[in-house]
Amino acid sequence: MAAIRNTLTYLVPDSFSVQPGQRVQVPLATRKATGIVLRAGSTLPPGIQARPILRLLDTEPVLTPELMELGLWIADYYVAPIGEVFRAMLPLRSATRRARSVRLSALGQQKLQEISQPEQEPAGPAGDLLAYLATRGSASVQVLRKKFSEAFLEALKEKWLVVDEVERERTQRQVYAVRLAGPVPEKPLRLSPVAKRILEALGTEGTAGDHRELLQTARADLAALKKLSASGLIELDPSKKSSLPGDTWAEGGTPLVLTPGQSTVLDDLTKQLESGQFQTVLLHGITGSGKTEIYLRLIARCLEIGRTALMLVPEISLTPSVQAQFLARFSSQVALLHSALSENERHEEWWRIRRGEAKVVLGTRSAIFAPLSNLGVVIIDEEHDTSYKQEETPRYHGRDVAVVRARLAGALAVLGSATPSLESYWNACEGKYRLAALPERVEGRKLADVEIIDMRQEFRETHTQVPVSRRLKQEIETQLSKRQQTMILLNRRGYSWFLLCRSCGQTQRCVNCSISLTYHRREHRLICHYCGYSAPVPARCPNCDSQHLYYVGEGTEKVEKKFAELFPGARVARLDRDVARRQGQFRHILDEFRRGQIDLLVGTQLIAKGHDFPGVTLVGVVSADIGLGLPDFRSAERTFQLLTQAAGRAGRGESPGRVLVQTFYPDHYAIRMAAEQNYEAFFHKEMRFRRMMHYPPVTALANVIAHGAKLDQAAQVAKHVGNFLIPLEKNTEGLKILGPTPAPLAKLEGRFRIQFLIKCTSRARLSTILQRLADYTDQQGIPQRSLMIDMDPANIM
Ligand SMILES: [Zn+2]
Ligand SMILES: [Zn+2]
């Protein structure tokens, strides 16, 4: 599946019978490539010289007709090469990695059982190989190559009967119990620092139930643990297997009783579902109104009527608690599809769905391509979340694809949010979607009180620029004295925002991107948040040699440190992407916070999304307004969503919650209306701005960026784009071209970027124009990587 826009024609040898949706191996120039059969015909189009297909990779199609149609729609609408769309839809193995050993997959084990039934014909070499693996657990590729042929082994891999061994540890989620083998000798001989840390972490009892927690405490890895075990000082007991993900999170107790509001919405959705007609419902339910319970019951009903269900959640919301609830309700019928799975795990889940064993799929964005048949309902939770938009080719929006998929399947689509995207709410106002509302919280809980703190006044009165106002500090002290938990939200990670020279005013910028580097104290380096470039902290200004370098702004790292100083008795922790990246830390901190072992949690928007912490009664927003300064027409919408979601974190349990919002723009409508938690007021105000400025959802928008390693290369590409677009503007109704201008991020990852923003009153017309633009630039010989076409962009930076 190469990144070609066109489709190719091949001859089908008489011995093969191919069907659309099947994978085949074909010759492409001088190499072999994998292709998907789109159509099979009986005659060759005239004038075509076709080469024959080499072999079939599947006995049955991997893509159902419905998914084929969905793929073609995506390729068309988002102007993406069809091959790349199919690649994004399928869990294909990467060709580059070579494993040293392989094992049987779950599918292989099943196959072996089937073929070893006594009434079956002898299974031949495939059966031999599977049986060989079954008796040994796994075997090296080298040995298997000698016993069987390499092509034969590859063929079994293609069918997912055999999978690479590398991921085995993760797939099985092996957990070791660890204990000291005996008393530690008085003078341990030459222990490495990491070994010392492990022994120290084992504590006075000398045992640990779960090696992963031990390694976290000791800042060590499994290899170090095994080495120590080999030395005889400790013993590892591998007998314990981890239970299902989210084991410690399972919500106990009796099923919840629905509120009258929940019942009404559920009844309405159930009727829609049972009608078997395609329909999209926007479920606008405020934070804490019990949307998840409605989803779970709707899915249960869907299974009862013999159909399947799919639910998408934003990447970061796929917490153990959501997984646990699904597993508790639907047990083995659930398949999980998300980016943390290994390639093999994904294959196995994918085939469980394809074979019809899993009837409920819970996953993140790309799970929208799960091969469920007879789909009855598609639910998009937190539908406003930007993680549904894929920021690489194919640049599809998971929410919009979900609606199309529901239409193709004759299913019900449910989009749920406390802060719907303007697009979806507009569609509901226009009658395209049905609107269902949950205006009240469950169990009569009150919405949090929100108080705005004017940081301009704070500065006038204190004459110091501090991250924490006197009011917030005092409130946190009260919280601590009452032993209640507080969450502090700010939306910049790192220590300081940037390093500024006081003499010449220059900031240290990324060499690849036109953006300031952020100072990270833990690494003591300057890091680019866009491309990951990092540089040492200079002692003097590289521009003017001045020594007066000054750290500006507070990131999560600095605020965490500051809070630890301000509140010496408090247990302070931090949660942002830097922390989440460290294996297991994300869940570990969430767990501790939930158990009340942390008093004060500082974090980015990661903590504002979808987690339910019953003990949190105060949320402090330190810098509510950073986002408002960004040159993106959605900045007010984003700020409103973030603040409303953050406010929804407070007081979800028994005690009412309070929210303190520090801002330099206390009068901005996004901040004021978030404080009132008044979505409708915000929607109408923001729509006035979008109408006036001709921005979505009133018009369709596309972002086209010409790239180049050198500025004049980008300019050359932009010239071709302009040649095509600008004459079109005059004779196309409702079309408006802005640009060419340097993109707000004029340089990114070492490439210069020139931007066109294209607005059109019709989405269909705009998509057609973009397809023609892609064809035109192909004809001009412009390489595809020099042009980014983004239909319905989530982000125009
Ligand atoms: Zn300087
Ligand atoms: Zn960069």
Image: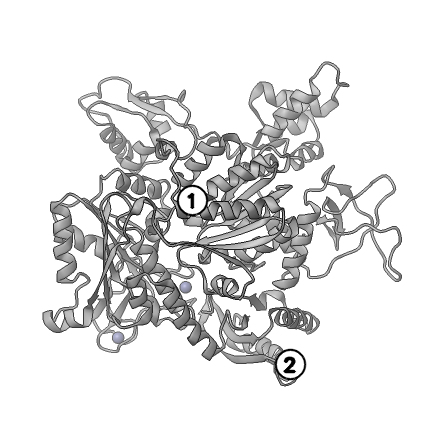
State the image coordinates of residue 121 (x, y, percent, origin top left).
77, 19
Q: Nearer the viewer, residue 489 or 443?
A: 443
Instruction: Tell whether 374 sits left or right of 496.
Output: right
For badge 2, the amino acid type reads Thr
For badge 1, the amino acid type reads Thr
Residue 271 visible in this rendered orientation of the protein:
yes
Write the residue at 60% across / 21% down: 134
Question: Where is mark 1, residue-wise?
Answer: 292
Label annotation for residue 732: 2
Residue 91 visible in this rendered orientation of the protein:
no
**Quadrant the C terminus occupies:** bottom left
Q: Quadrant of ligand 2?
A: bottom left
State the image coordinates of residue 710 (x, y, percent, origin top left).
52, 73
Write the residue at 66% across / 84% down: 731
Tag count in the figure?
2
> Is disc 1's CB within 8 Å of ligand 2?
no
